Image (spheres, coloured by chain):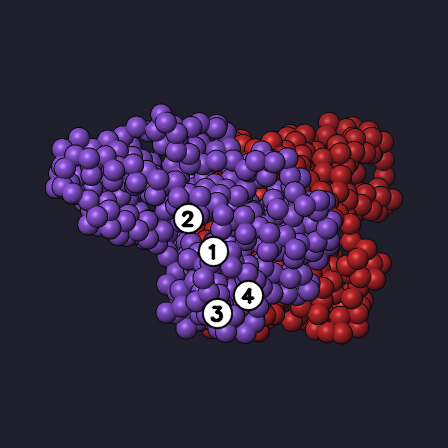
Chain colours: A red, B purple
Amino acid sequence: MRAVEPIRWTSDGVVLLDQRRLPGEEIHHTYTDYRDVAKAIKDMEIRGAPAIGVAAAMGIALGVQQSKAKDLRELRADFANICDDFACTRPTAVDLFWAIERFKTRFDDLARSSDAGDGSVRKIQHALVDEAQKVHQERRDADERIGRFGAELMPKSGRVMTQCNAGALATGGIGTALGVIRTAVENGAGFEVLVPETRPYLQGARLTAWELHHDGIPLTLITDNMVGHFLKTGKVGAVVVGADRIARNGDTANKIGTYGIAVLAREHNVPFYVAAPISTLDLKLASGDEIPIEERSQEEVTHLAGKRISPDVRAAHPAFDVTPSRLIAAIITERGVARAPYEDSLTKLARAHS
Amino acid sequence: MRAVEPIRWTSDGVVLLDQRRLPGEEIHHTYTDYRDVAKAIKDMEIRGAPAIGVAAAMGIALGVQQSKAKDLRELRADFANICDDFACTRPTAVDLFWAIERFKTRFDDLARSSDAGDGSVRKIQHALVDEAQKVHQERRDADERIGRFGAELMPKSGRVMTQCNAGALATGGIGTALGVIRTAVENGAGFEVLVPETRPYLQGARLTAWELHHDGIPLTLITDNMVGHFLKTGKVGAVVVGADRIARNGDTANKIGTYGIAVLAREHNVPFYVAAPISTLDLKLASGDEIPIEERSQEEVTHLAGKRISPDVRAAHPAFDVTPSRLIAAIITERGVARAPYEDSLTKLARAHS
């Protein structure tokens, strides 16, 4: 079983799967101009914070590779422009800026150890292409480790519930929550996945259902308001979700609806797991109360597929909610599994060498 | 404030509001042939069990009024055909059969006290038209009483949450849950209503939002997975929903999603109320475990407005769920407010004279 690859570095260019067209069409674009990669990020052809980080890394490397610079001074100017172009694409995506910073540091290191001529231009071009592939490989490795740690917590049969899309499409690896599910299934677990559709953007129906179907993992799609009914009657052995940001005490911001699922899981004694890379931890925040909740467009609620589904009324659209850590059985990272008290366990994992 | 009227008896015929076209279009059809009323019920132009009962009563009266019968024998034959036509429209709607039985009893009573000539034909025709209007008036009165009892339980400000559509569109009166909300607002309460969209059929977004907007009651539309977030952060003072069937112990079947809302309301100490007429009680059932859950078409989950929103995967579509009575603060009926222990309080109300 090979998870879908939403991003690939090839000798022809950067290949991206257009996620906006899923599940209706599976279209891959091969980009040879870095500006097109930046535009693909901006236009949400690729989404999911970790995947955006990988795409930006590849885009920067592509831009540097394209550069016609004759010397280090010219390359440095081109590099700065390329980084600026990516910084403008999705201003709130943490992984985007992490990738840019990493490339800036790497560029400076390489420049310091080079002479100023065209030999060093080619050397830096090659090194940054390698760096992009290293970013991607690290992302893949982290997902694999999260998958292995998490798989041991999954039931052998029955059902597992997830939420939104914390899959290959969102990370460029095997996914975080879906990486756990994939690894458990590869190890022989025979459960079915319950996939809430995740209104308003339908990441569950459009992306998670598509990924699991692609991999041949059994699933049943449900509407978000069926979660309680299935936790009560549907033999669910575990819930596993991703995370957008995790505070020092373990409180976790994730896609809207996650909090409700966590409360309902607790009501039925179903363990609720968060699967996320260490980079998702924000140890500066003492608790989830400090996590800002992005309010998105009302039209995404009042319209569906371009069609108005309600009268012209006010709608709310908080994109995320916060699940208090008391409802979380464990947080699965690439460095191990954290359990309560989370302030201790998460701080320890964050400080550990990977 | 006058609630919308989905059904009206007029001198021109039976006027129905086409609920399938809401909220995009507000179209009323005037039917002068009873067969068209039967077809309107079958085609879900009108929905909601109590409203179907009222529409069937008016349709039967319309058919009897149309009859060219010259004597009682001919009228009786026509009447039997009319009743059969309505019995085929929505085979699971309890109120439909209740209306047919009531008209059969009334017809027999009238026939017994009449001679067999054409004078008695006209007498019965008039009496059954009166009976249909009486059914509608009783429905209106019950909603008004539910509204008055329930209004006292509503907060004066903040927010009230509902689910699906338990409104005028579903009953032909002011509605049950929405009747409580309307009455509280008429009595001066200043709350806003949180309306979950209620996937897959979107009764919240399409019907409840439209009704409240029509009446000028402030509302905010949310997706179903925002319920937990708003119960945690949104100053919700009460939840009030309708019911499809209530067992002897108070366990309540209602639109899918209701159970999850009830658990989340309890988590945040928000009282959860059920508003329903006595006819919804099914005292033969000891508990909610005995209530069958209708499984509806998968396409309603995988498609929206005729458009596929997921890949070709399995979907589940239980149309209802069961909320255990321990999560219900009170059941509001037209004969008063029942509280735990429900077996006592509901049995007492069911036996009381209205």
Residue designated by label 1: B277
Residue designated by label 3: B348
Residue designated by label 4: B338
For label 2, the crowd category at 10 Å Cα-Cα, with few meaning under 14, some 14 to 19 and many 20 or more, is many
Disc ID at residue B50: 2
Q: Which of A244/B125 is in front?
A: B125
Alpha carbons under labels 1 and 4: distance apart: 12 Å
Read off the chain for label 3: B
Q: Amino acid at mark 4?
A: Ala
Alpha carbons under labels 2 and 4: distance apart: 21 Å
Alpha carbons under labels 3 and 4: distance apart: 9 Å
Residue found at the very far right of the displayed protein: A112
**In the image, residue B265 above or below residue A98:** below
Residue found at the very far top of the displayed protein: B12
**In the image, residue B255 above or below residue B72:** below
Alpha carbons under labels 1 and 3: distance apart: 14 Å
Read off the chain for label 2: B
Alpha carbons under labels 2 and 1: distance apart: 9 Å
- Secondary element under disc 2, as helix, strand or loop, is helix
Q: Amino acid at mark 1?
A: Pro
- The percent position of residue A62, horizontal first and vertical second, equals 67, 36
Drawn side of residue B192 relative to residue A181, left or right: right
Both marks 2 and 1 on one chain: yes
Chain-order first, disc 2 or disc 1: 2
For label 4, the crowd category at 10 Å Cα-Cα, with few meaning under 14, some 14 to 19 and many 20 or more, is many
Chain-order first, disc 2 or disc 3: 2
Q: Are marks 2 and 1 in contact (CB under 8 Å)?
A: yes
Read off the chain for label 4: B
